[in-house]
Image (spheres, coloured by chain):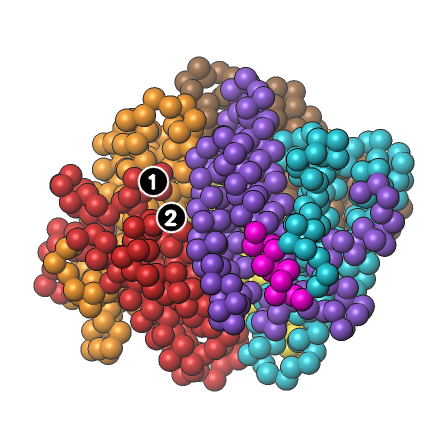
Chain colours: A yellow, B brown, C orange, D red, E purple, F cyan
Amino acid sequence: MSLLSTRTASRLLSVADLDDAATADAHCDLMCGVYNPAQARIEAESVLEIMKKYNASDDDYFRTRCIIIKEERAQLAKEHLWVLWTDYFKPPHVEQFPQLHDLFWRATKAAGDAKKSNEEADGQKLLDLIDEIAGIFAETKK
Amino acid sequence: MSLLSTRTASRLLSVADLDDAATADAHCDLMCGVYNPAQARIEAESVLEIMKKYNASDDDYFRTRCIIIKEERAQLAKEHLWVLWTDYFKPPHVEQFPQLHDLFWRATKAAGDAKKSNEEADGQKLLDLIDEIAGIFAETKK
Amino acid sequence: MSLLSTRTASRLLSVADLDDAATADAHCDLMCGVYNPAQARIEAESVLEIMKKYNASDDDYFRTRCIIIKEERAQLAKEHLWVLWTDYFKPPHVEQFPQLHDLFWRATKAAGDAKKSNEEADGQKLLDLIDEIAGIFAETKK
Amino acid sequence: MSLLSTRTASRLLSVADLDDAATADAHCDLMCGVYNPAQARIEAESVLEIMKKYNASDDDYFRTRCIIIKEERAQLAKEHLWVLWTDYFKPPHVEQFPQLHDLFWRATKAAGDAKKSNEEADGQKLLDLIDEIAGIFAETKK
Amino acid sequence: MSLLSTRTASRLLSVADLDDAATADAHCDLMCGVYNPAQARIEAESVLEIMKKYNASDDDYFRTRCIIIKEERAQLAKEHLWVLWTDYFKPPHVEQFPQLHDLFWRATKAAGDAKKSNEEADGQKLLDLIDEIAGIFAETKK
Amino acid sequence: MSLLSTRTASRLLSVADLDDAATADAHCDLMCGVYNPAQARIEAESVLEIMKKYNASDDDYFRTRCIIIKEERAQLAKEHLWVLWTDYFKPPHVEQFPQLHDLFWRATKAAGDAKKSNEEADGQKLLDLIDEIAGIFAETKK
């Protein structure tokens, strides 16, 4: 990220350039109107990092804290995904992407699995499913 | 976002390319290890959108819901900012960016002000302060 | 409920007679192991009752409290449904009940709609969808 | 539950037959109007199941997760009981059931004890106290 | 408070002088070991102040925010009281103060009433009941 | 506390004598209007007590519960401090106490450190920093 100006950085962080009505597509016309798969992804990245730290440590106290915090982060990933599924996507999206329901089901199950496991592959699987969702999300913004 | 491939989209969503250890700087070495000003920004975008919807409506029921939800979203923006301030930034950052404490204080106060007001300028001010923080955050990643 | 003995009442409240291993099917073999559509239904009943009270009142203060509390109760209904969908149901259930994903999607959307509306029909629709889910849930327990 | 029709299943889940005003006694005339000891019981069942799983396992990671989740479930049982005690029951109930205060005190203390212990008898004691409360609750509905 | 030194101020804030084992009676021997009726009282003070501000204002937007925040503060007062009742007090306390259960019941009901009303007398009643509890609490520390 | 009358005890618990407008300085003129460093201190006392119990025990189950609960209590201490910093203090306070920002930063970091450690010195450090804040808070009330 080292070449980014402040202005560019903030653009990347934004789901929509709010100065530009023509592209203000990042929020739907619902009440809570701003959606972004980044919310789930940030939590899922945290889950994977915690797994790595857990596996690299042999300190019981530290590892217990890893379990506690991973439980919370994976739950947040799950909740962000549920909100996206129920609140952002509409029937025409499901017609266009018939895999959508199953994809979210597998992604939220993967978040549950990431609580039960410290296998980094389980954390990566959650990230991959979120990326797949993010890809569809980006398609709906075209 | 219409020109982005799925792969690119997921990269933008990520604070770090997790496949590339050399740039895996988006998380610090603390426990909760993944930080991203996007979390605060997404909530702040929601705050501004709610203000716009409130101002465009004359339905009492809808406007009451706007107030309830804006209260929650502004609180989340505040909390994400507090976590970033306390947990991500370290003494050398404060030396390099002496305005940091005051900037976070004004940004979290702006989140409080955005609860009290429906002036879109107050919502924009919160976003601008978060962008200023995001700029510093990006600098620390160089 | 006036004819029920205490013993019978507690049986109705229970999803499984815990003294009887042969019927202890109310929890699956997952960690959080106890599932019950009653959790979502109780919240949804509350949503409908609040709508009725809202519509029967002309006290602004009372009606504002109705909106606040309905928002919370509908959110809880939504969350209980999400947990049931992701955590209780397994791939063989989806094969047997191919409508499952769509049913949960419509039910959680109905919980969202019940936030936006005070039409009692919207509250009843949420209850009907939960009852449809409860029927499938009961089938999986046979 | 295998002999129940969908319709019957949903009736059991309901605290009141909402189609039948004459029996709509499951909610009181307060704001949050719907009460049901099932909410506490479902969490308490979960507490007992977690104890069983904890005792049957020798996997440290799994057992730590048991402790974390049991802590949450017992807390929820406690909170549902507190709400029932303060919000549902009225002075005439206390006259009719003079043991009510002490019963709730012991039940909420039992929920606390179920955090501190993995003795299944402690989980069962919590369930028994909730059933005793559910019996009184059912009496007040006659 | 203007005559208090910093040291004295912090002593008042403390439930126990932690440097002095002989007076370390502010926590019981339970896990969560530190109890203080001040937690409920601070929230109840907030409830009364919000009522005053609500009554002094004729700004609909401000008054709606008052209702939202009072709902939360009264709930926190309720929760702190419930914890104190269940977790701090033991059977010998109930023998010594037979009014204890009823007092907590009325106090938590008063917290509920303070949600439903903007009568400052209702806020004051909650404070008075908390003070009565604080008096008993102080007695148990003698 | 054994020499205090009930009336005196309740006064100590109060941040302001609400019957006496002249001294009603314990709440500022903001919405949430009642502030008190006691909220953070009570949680921090709990953190230190939990550390002591953890260190005095060799029961794995008990120690895991200590870690879970300490995590929550330290988080609450952190949150109460953040609220005080952002919501109570105003620019003139910062002019008068230029160390304020840094003091809160170190205090909230100390709350984070108290999660990571069971060194009682880390718990005491958090308490000392809160007392330093409480001293400044008392100064602003003169």
**Nearest the camera: E40 or D24?**
E40
Decide whether the magenta segment is chiefly helix, strand or loop.
helix
Q: Which residue is mark 1?
A: D30
Indicate whether residue E139 is drawn in magenta.
Answer: yes
Disc 2: host chain? D
Side of F121 where B80 appears, left or right: left
Disc 1: host chain? D
Q: Position of residue B29 (x, y in %)?
A: 73, 60
Residue visible at 13% across and 65% down in the picture: D2
- Do tags 1 and 2 sit on the same chain? yes
Report the span colored magenta: E132-142
Task: Count neighbours of disc 1 (C-alpha within 10 A) and say few if under 14, some if 14 to 19, many if 20 or more.
Answer: few
Task: Count neighbours of disc 2 (C-alpha within 10 A) and say few if under 14, some if 14 to 19, many if 20 or more.
Answer: some
**Nearest the camera: C133 or F70?**
F70
Q: Which residue is mark 2?
A: D87
N-terminal-most mark, 1 or 2: 1
Q: Position of residue E134 (x, y in %)?
A: 60, 54
